[in-house]
Amino acid sequence: MTARILDGLALATSVRGQLAERAATLKSQGVTPCLAVILVGEDPASAVYVRNKVAACEKAGMRSIKDSYAADIDPAEVFARIAELNADPEVHGILVQLPLPGHFDEDAVLEAIDPSKDVDGFHAGNIGALMQGNPRFIPCTPYGVMKMLEAEKVNLKGAEAVIVGRSNIVGKPMAMLLLAQSCTVTVCHSQSRDLAFHTRRADILVAAVGRARMIRGDMIKPGATVIDVGINRLPDGKLCGDVDFESAREVAGRITPVPGGVGPMTITMLLANTLEAAERTLMEKTA
């Protein structure tokens, strides 16, 4: 068996085309979807992510605002800027690029964003709504994964889903989304005993633990759908996921590559959340 490779870039291109049409409709009604991005410091990876997000916005016909600050900026200035963006009716989404420098309280920064503009879905109010099964915004990476499963017509009802990783950004919201689709969900992590026992039971395996090639082919159930969320840089500079792709593809039924799998869908769903925020704004105006 050789797994079907799930092309996240192709799916992202298709979805972004649909988003561009919705953005054009909004603009014809006097609303231009707008995402504001705040970058603190000069972390190279963060700079690339922000640049890609801004470019994706503009290509989809959406407006973007980028605010960059030195790493030693007084957090009070960033909080003041967030307050300005919260109050600006023409800004629909606000994103603070993580990680932040050590003198910042990341939780406090995320909580400062208006929940109705928290397009990353990290505000406690939005996390709580997701837990209750009525999300306002779904965190972008898990949202992208669900779109990939939907596009592949993966049967989720009653499926055994195993998530390796318990972060607030991927692992926990991923569990809630799969549970809402009637999967039987197990959440593992780097400290789980006999990890392979759990992963071999998975019809759907999501790897999001941040360890290069941690999941090997002999840890995968034959025919499983394997979603690799990890992005790790090897000593030679190449990127790889949390799954050992070459051994896994010989066992799995479907698998996402790294790069080119989940990554493109993450930014796509950020655009989707921003667009949804703008559409809600228009609905409130016309109600």
Image (spheres, rainbow, N blue to C red):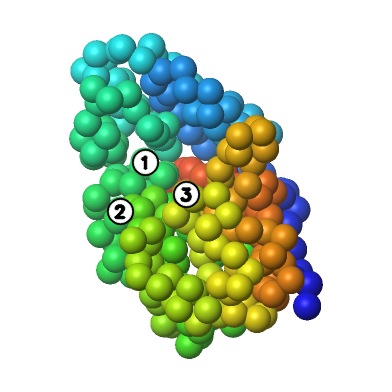
Q: Identify the residue shown where x is 43% and y is 70%.
A: 195
Q: Identify the residue shown where x is 78% and y is 78%.
A: 1
Q: Residue furthest right?
A: 2
Relative height, residue 58 to residue 287 (above, below): above
x and y percentages locating residue 149 in the rendered image: 60, 69
* Marks 3 & 1, CB-CB < 8 Å contact: no
* Marks 2 & 3, CB-CB < 8 Å contact: no
Q: Nearer the viewer, mark 2 or mark 3?
A: 3
Q: How many marks?
A: 3
The kind of residue on which mark 3 rests is: Gly
- Residue 243 appears in view: yes
Residue 210 disc label: 3
- Residue placed most toward the observer, 209 or 89: 209
Marks 3 and 1, the one that precedes in the sequence? 1
Residue 126 disc label: 2
Residue 117 disc label: 1
